[in-house]
Amino acid sequence: MHTIKTQIKTDCANCEKRSNSFLKDIPKSSLYLFQNYRKAQKSLPARSIIFEEAKSHDFIYTILSGWAILYKTVSNNGKRQILRFVLPGDLIGYQTTAHGHLAHSACTITQSVLCAFSRTEIKPLLSKHPELAVRLLEMGSKDISLCQNHLIATGRKTAKESIAYVLLELFFRVKKQIPNDYESDTNSIMFPITQEDLGDAVGLTNIHVNRVIKELISNKLITCNKRKLSILKESELSELAGFSHEMM
Amino acid sequence: MHTIKTQIKTDCANCEKRSNSFLKDIPKSSLYLFQNYRKAQKSLPARSIIFEEAKSHDFIYTILSGWAILYKTVSNNGKRQILRFVLPGDLIGYQTTAHGHLAHSACTITQSVLCAFSRTEIKPLLSKHPELAVRLLEMGSKDISLCQNHLIATGRKTAKESIAYVLLELFFRVKKQIPNDYESDTNSIMFPITQEDLGDAVGLTNIHVNRVIKELISNKLITCNKRKLSILKESELSELAGFSHEMM
DNA sequence: CGACCTTTTGATTGGCGTCAAAATCTGTGG
DNA sequence: CCACAGATTTTGACGCCAATCAAAAGGTCG
């Protein structure tokens, strides 16, 4: 576990340039107002905790760069369930229980840069600026969709199908949210996820994930290591996974 | 599959009286305005389809009475995943894909009464009445929480644990959202769900669900049939399930 | 009362977990 | 720039939880 370094910067210019940031399409007047509530920019090393389940925490964040995960530790057996992979442009930390505690933990996968907003100061803002609330509704709707498809993959698909599904979902989310890592190679993305992470996302052991991924590789559907994921036969893999672009 | 009977009624008085309806806490001024968009009250028999995945549909609904489910059919193997049990006061049908199609199907479990609102007419309303948007945000937040805990039950719990979890979740949601079915017996609720439904919710076969439920019964933790569910030892069952009231 | 739905039971199978250990990769410090 | 420790991937053997198949028993509703 690493120490969290916080560095306040007045310049956060890239934040609202990102096309899929939650500040997209917010009218300038509201946007400027919202900017006032930007409190800090944090740069975190890989595998460091952003916030923890069941605690209270004053900030919500947008990811400017890097990968992270939202997860929960199961109380009766200590296992981890990854709820969501977090990519640049995503908003995290807004979800609390009825008692005001965080619903889950968040942890960086790679070195990341976050932009923090004060939770308490933003709430009253929503009533005054409906565009913000509507934008949050849209994002929430995508979150639910993502979670439901994730549930289907975990509940009603075989190991092979569910892993294929997660790989495809991540592939297209990255393509959409992160500017080309491998310009020349449109079938590939940077892929810093371990096989254990994948297992914790779909309810499998890292060992079985390994067996399945090796099978997908030997079937020439993908290539995959901790650096890079390539989708070799998109349509075939999509059919196997029960994945469609409609889902995204 | 049953024919959908639609009957328009001007009186929908109980709708906003329910304490957990999505219209709760909305100022009178907005509320009256919102009421204008109430289009119809539908009464449906048990096991009838409310709307179907991937189609377009003009209405969103609140449940006035009865139980329903949101589900999706997995494209590559035809299996069903239940995403959510729907109880009186819940709002359904607002979730669409980027292409404007419904994200999932909905079906009644028991005979039900729904209150319909026009989707297209409500959207512009949100910008004008932030309280509505904020209220929807709150509901969306609960939906996500529910879905995430459901994912954990399916992904990282054993059959016994996940079934115990679903029973407890339903038990307390019913207690909160439906007025006492069995006044004298506070440990019991009406329970119209089949074991096959339970299996489709947590990714198990009806046969294995049956074995587990019989085990829970013989352990004297619950009694359960298609009419009635009783929680006999709440704390013991909760510990087994990894369930806590914080989750709700 | 009779057809269908739901629950129950038993036998068998198989997918994925567990355990153990080797091989490889990665990052850090000397 | 190399060495080394820890993390991650890979392999194999074995076991178990839950699926599958089959069929009987019990419930429910028209």
Image (spheres, coloured by chain):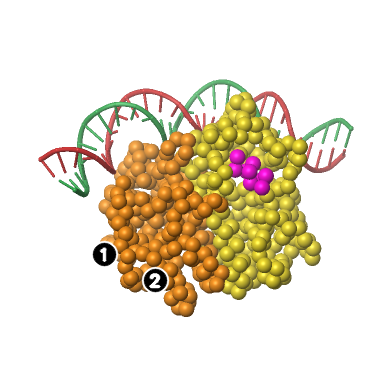
Chain colours: A yellow, B orange, C red, D green
Residue at the bottom extreme?
Answer: B29
Q: Is residue C27 left or right of residue A138?
A: right
**Count of all numbered marks drawn on residues in the image:** 2
Disc 2 residue type (three-letter)? Glu
Q: Is residue A222 above or below residue B3?
A: above
- Between label 1 and label 2, give the one nearer the viewer: 2
Residue identifier under label 1:
B184
Q: At 37% from the left edge and 72% from the top edge, which residue is drawn?
A: B17
Mark 1 and mark 2: Cα distance apart in space: 27 Å
Dot 1 crowding, Cα within 10 Å, few <14, some 14–19, many 20+: few
Earlier-in-chain disc, 1 versus 2: 2
Q: Secondary structure at mark 1?
A: loop
Q: Is residue B14 above or below residue B192?
A: below
In this orientation, which residue lies closer to the viewer: B245 or A103? A103
Q: At 70% from the left edge and 62% from the top edge, which residue is drawn?
A: A116
Residue identifier under label 2:
B16
